Image (cartoon, rainbow, N blue to C red):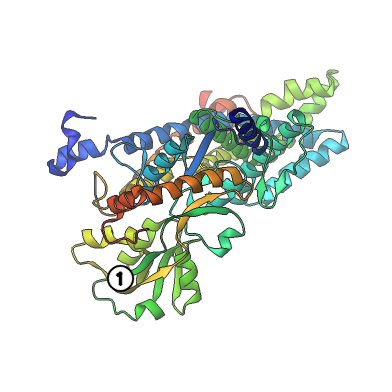
Amino acid sequence: MKKTTFAIIAAAFAASGAMAQDVVRMGSEGAYPPYNFINDATGELDGYERELGDEICRRAELNCEWVINDWDTIIPNLVSGNYDTIMAGMSITEARMEVIAFSQNYLLPEPSAFIGLADTDESARDTGVIAAQSNTIQAAFVADSDADLLEFPTPDETISALRNGEADAVLADKAFLAPYVADSNGELVFLGDDVILGGGIGIGLRQSDDALRDTLNAVIDEMKADGSLNAMIEKWFGPDHPKF
Amino acid sequence: MFSFCTDPSVLPDWQWFACYLTNATHLQFYRAFGVVLVLLAITAPVALGMGMLGALALRSRFAPLVWFGKGYVNIVRGVPDIVFFLFVPIALGQGIEWVMHQINCPDWDQPIRQGNDFIVCREAKVPPLNSAAWVYQLYAFLMAVVAFALVFGAFAANTLHGAMQAVPRAQIETAEAYGMTRAQAFRRIVLPQMWVYALPGLSNIWQILIKATPLLFLLGIQDIVFWARELGGQKTSLFAYPHPDWRMWYFLGLLCFYLFLTWGSERAFARLNARLSRGQATAAGERMRKAAA
């Protein structure tokens, strides 16, 4: 009996083309702290997604390797097979679901926030110039509103645009903005209430990669159940961040 | 790097900077300068070779070869570099994998394109599955060399073709009068003399090639522009070395690097030009002859 089960599993793996011992290449951006960033002391990718990804790979007994790729080409390089997953703070949206598949979310739908210089009026949210990273849910949100959208390829550049007066406000994930506000000695402030965007953050996968998606979903389920995922969220995002 | 770097937040300024400028990310930044120089050193001769082949095709008496040369030169020169650089790595990468797939997996029954996905069998993956990370990096680098050589080879082909045409007809006629064949006349008369005509154009292309290397960044190679932007961006207290937006200083550094590189190559070209003009029936050659006399 045991032997047959094993044979079936082995056959399933062989058919899917994704053998257990294959290296799984994990794509990330490395420019969105605390989700993913390049640690300046070690030169390695670091952050919540690095730690979570490594833990998922350990539990699923996958051999994983990280690849850093520019945000704007992160989806084309996934579908053409340069790497196998995306863990880059990517929210699950309808538009992206048409091109790639997602695992279940490993972060709940999160608050996005506007920040501005200290004396900015809150009305800038609706009528001003808002900087956002291109191809993000925040950029899509601003494009649909009455405010003017100013897009940048990296999240860091949105903050600079705010500082030098090109933009009136920045819209981004609150967890990304919080350290900038905290470090600015009152120069930068949150404008008004948070907005909840997107369907949470998940691991991006090729639509044909069902086996890998099932494996990852199973491990994320396990980590949600035993509380280890929440502990990791608390470590990287603080106690106030939404938890499972 | 240094023994005192364990906790940068308590260091005095000069030590902080000593640690900061030698941390792991900066070492990768410095290595990226080497990558750019290696790319230039490899791409320039390859592009010149492509240019020579292109120029020979343009000169050929075999019509299809001429059409091929014209097609190559005009298509590549007509398409913006940036479009080409976005196109080549993906198209070439998929093309190679497609060919490998046809060779290695003839009885594969699933379609290669499934919706948006490009899927080939395990044996067709390039680089091979489970290769080390450096193999992937080398592959990306070679893609970059091919993309640069294709683009700059087309410009070089046009320049070299023009230079071959510029060699005075009388010289070739004399060669023919001595009974040389077309190939002999080309090898002994045209080829040695064309360089002086080609040099200004080639030096232009070389300078443009230097200035085009930041496009590496588009090819997924973490080049100096990537690192300047990454390192210069504001670092919050989440990082070991927090600092405000310093991109201006990093880009200033890049500016100096590129200026130095183009200044050095300008000097090298000036010397080369003097060497090639010696004894030539050109204005520069004539001046040298008079100065010596």
Where is A190 relative to A14, above or below?
below
Q: Residue at x 59, y 50 (%)?
A: A76
Estimate the x, y position of residue B261 in percent, counting from the top left: 43, 37
Q: Residue at x 82, y 27 (%)?
A: B173
Estimate the x, y position of residue B258 in percent, counting from the top left: 42, 41
Estimate the x, y position of residue B143 in percent, counting from the top left: 59, 36
Estimate the x, y position of residue B59 in percent, counting from the top left: 79, 35
Q: Residues within 10 Å of mark 1 (few under 14, many from 20)?
A: many
Q: Residue at x 16, y 37 (%)?
A: B15
Q: Residue at x 67, y 42 (%)?
A: B119
Give the camera-side residue of A188 and A178.
A178
Q: For this view, does B20 lie left or right of residue A47?
A: left
Q: Quadrant of the N terminus of chain A?
A: top right
Residue B254 in view here: no
Q: Quadrant of the C terminus of chain A?
A: bottom left
Q: For this view, does B153 lie left or right of residue B204?
A: right
Pick out the residue farthest to the top.
B179
Residue B87 in view here: yes
Q: Which amino acid lies under the numbered mark 1 shown in the image of this protein? A: Gly
Q: Quadrant of residue B164?
A: top right
Give the camera-side residue of A240 and B220.
A240
Give the camera-side residue of B185 and B31.
B31
Residue at numbered disc 1: A116
Where is B155 relative to A178, above or below?
above
Q: Chain of mark 1?
A: A
Element assignment for label 1: strand
Give the camera-side residue of A57 and B53.
A57
Pick out the residue farthest to the front.
A1
Q: Count the marks.
A: 1
Q: For this view, does B10 lie left or right of residue B73?
A: left
